[in-house]
Image (cartoon, rainbow, N blue to C red):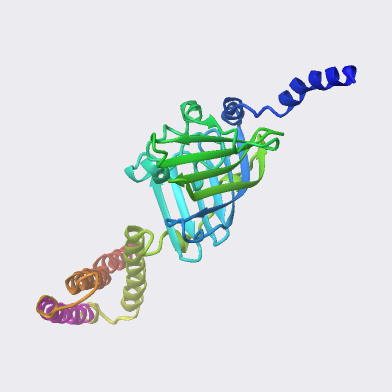
Amino acid sequence: MHPLVLLALALVPVTTLAQEPVSLESVAAGYFGAETYCETAIWGTRQDPARDFSSAPLFSRCAHRDGRFKVVFPHKEVLWSDGKKYYRHNDAANFYREIPLDDDFLRSFDGNRGEVYPVYFSRLLNRYSPNAPDRASTSYFRTYKLSRALSTSVHSVFERHDDENHTNSERLWVRNADKAIVRYEGLRNGAILHFVEVTSMEVNRPLTDADLTHRTPPFTRFSLANNPVVFIAGLFAAAAIAAALFWGRLITRAAGQDGIARTRRRLWRAQFWMLRGIAIVLPLLAVLAIIIPGKGHPPGLWLVIVLAMWCAVGFALAATFTLMSHPVEWLFSRSARDAAKR
């Protein structure tokens, strides 16, 4: 009996050492030292602990240490960055935006810098832990403490709290076998309101352009809703090209300049009559929008203002079409004079 007891007592430290949880600083060092990182994960969020999580879709993302990254969601939404701008495209909603990384909008957005460790720039929201240090620094990981109550031989669980009352807190679940962060939880008063769970990951895998970039259709990028400046500029360019073709054909088929001048006067007269009508109708609509009580948002006056803006654009397009007759006529007359000299 005595040798067996001594052997059992000798094995106790070995067993304890084998089940000793990993160090979070060593885990962080592995991620900070990575050149590239890819993962697939699910996430969920809710405002009320009594309700279910609003969504938990599977998403995938890849990141490079130089600041480039790409996140793909199942509902045809893609977020990516080339290290200079942040881009977002939702094909289902025909939505596209590009924002410089120094824009104030991105101050609360995690992940437009060079960090490549998981979850921190995909779906991590600062409002669940407003006093957290910069997640792109090792000081953030030092605020975590090991939770022996939640840790097991498979996972080491680390917690951090924003205040003494533990109103806002965070948890990181680390797999002991490979020191991989596999789950993040954001809690308020002990209830999980936000989580990200990593289902697969790859570290230091060579990434191609397809892993970090996304092609957006030109009609989506330069549509009226996504890029009104370029869209309206395109309308004026199309009006100028159509006018050049129209006036060029009319000049080549006209018997003299009188017919061209007569057509031009008719167009100007029609446009000015339209302008007079608009100048009468829009003020009346504005008065009605102010007098008649309405409900909802936006107020009717804003609709009148938007209508006025579009009327101005329409009149400018019509004027561009008519004004193009002068340079086209000048070019044709000059070509005719050069041909006569020869």
Residue 267: tell me if it is visible. Answer: yes
Region in magenta: 261-287
Q: Position of residue 231 (x, y in %)?
A: 36, 62
Figure quadrant of residue 291: bottom left
Q: Is residue 123 left or right of residue 277?
A: right
Q: Position of residue 275 (x, y in %)?
A: 15, 77
Q: Is residue 337 magenta?
A: no
Q: Position of residue 315 (x, y in %)?
A: 22, 72
| Majority SS type along the magenta span | helix
Number of numbered discs present?
Answer: 0
Residue 111: tell me if it is visible. Answer: no
Would you place residue 300 above or below residue 163 in this image?
A: below
Would you place residue 310 above or below residue 18 in this image?
A: below
Q: Quadrant of the N terminus?
A: top right
Q: Is residue 245 left or right of residue 273?
A: right
Would you place residue 258 above or below residue 180 in this image?
A: below
Name which residue lies at 34% across and 80% down: 253
Q: Is residue 265 magenta?
A: yes
Name which residue lies at 48% across and 57% down: 89
Q: Position of residue 204 (x, y in %)?
A: 66, 34
